[in-house]
Image (cartoon, rainbow, N blue to C red):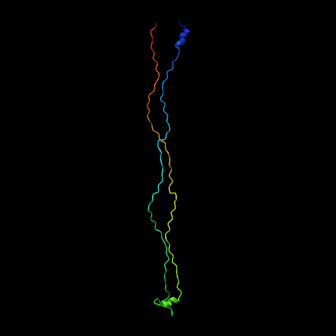
C-alpha cells in the first residue's frame, strides 16, 4: 500500500513531450558569374581641314619693258646670261594623329533582390498515449 505522501508524488510527475521544428535559414551560394568585356568599335569619321600652299605670283611693273631688257620671247642665250632664281614653294598636308582619351565612366553595381520562397517539410512530434489498465 502506498502512503499518501508517495501517492502525491506519483501524481505530480511531469512528462515532457518533444516535437521537431522546421528551421529554415538563408545560405549564400554562388549562382552565376558575369564577365564584363570591353570591345573596340571602329567608325568612319570625316573631318574637313583647311590646308594652305604657296603659289608663285608674277607681277609686271609698268606698261612697257625698259630699254635693253629682253621680253618674254628672248633667246635662250640672253636668258642664260642672267642668274636663274630658284624659289621653293611650300604646302601644308594634313597630319593625322590618334589620341586615346577617356570619354565615359561606367559604374558596375551588384544589387541584391529579395523574393519569398515557400519551403515545406515533414516534422515529427511526440504524442502521449494514455490507456487505463484495469486493476487486478
- The residue nearer to you, when weighing 106 against 78, is 78
Residue 7 drawn at (x, y percent): 53, 10
Number of numbered labels in the structure image: 0
Residue at position x 55%, y 10% in the image: 6
Rendering coords of residue 58 (x, y %): 49, 83
Of residues 59 and 19, which is closer to you in this image? 19
Q: Please, which residue is most extreme toward the bottom here?
A: 67
* Residue at the image position 54 percent from the left and 8 percent from the top: 4
Q: Residue furthest right?
A: 5
- For the point 51% across and 88% down, the residue is 80
Position of 131 relative to 21 (above/below): above
Residue 117 locus on image (x, y percent): 44, 36
Q: Position of residue 82 (x, y in %)?
A: 53, 88
Amino acid at each position: 500500500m502506498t502512503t499518501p505522501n508517495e501517492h502525491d508524488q506519483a501524481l505530480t510527475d511531469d512528462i515532457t513531450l518533444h516535437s521537431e521544428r522546421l528551421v529554415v535559414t538563408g545560405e549564400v551560394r554562388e549562382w552565376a558569374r558575369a564577365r564584363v568585356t570591353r570591345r573596340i568599335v571602329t567608325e568612319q569619321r570625316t573631318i574637313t581641314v583647311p590646308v594652305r600652299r604657296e603659289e608663285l605670283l608674277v607681277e609686271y611693273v609698268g606698261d612697257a619693258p625698259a630699254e635693253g631688257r629682253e621680253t618674254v620671247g628672248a633667246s635662250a642665250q640672253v636668258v642664260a646670261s642672267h642668274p636663274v632664281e630658284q624659289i621653293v614653294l611650300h604646302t601644308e598636308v594634313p597630319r593625322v594623329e590618334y589620341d586615346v582619351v577617356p570619354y565615359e565612366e561606367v559604374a558596375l553595381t551588384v544589387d541584391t533582390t529579395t523574393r519569398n520562397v515557400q519551403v515545406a517539410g515533414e516534422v515529427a512530434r511526440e504524442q502521449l498515449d494514455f490507456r487505463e489498465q484495469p486493476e487486478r
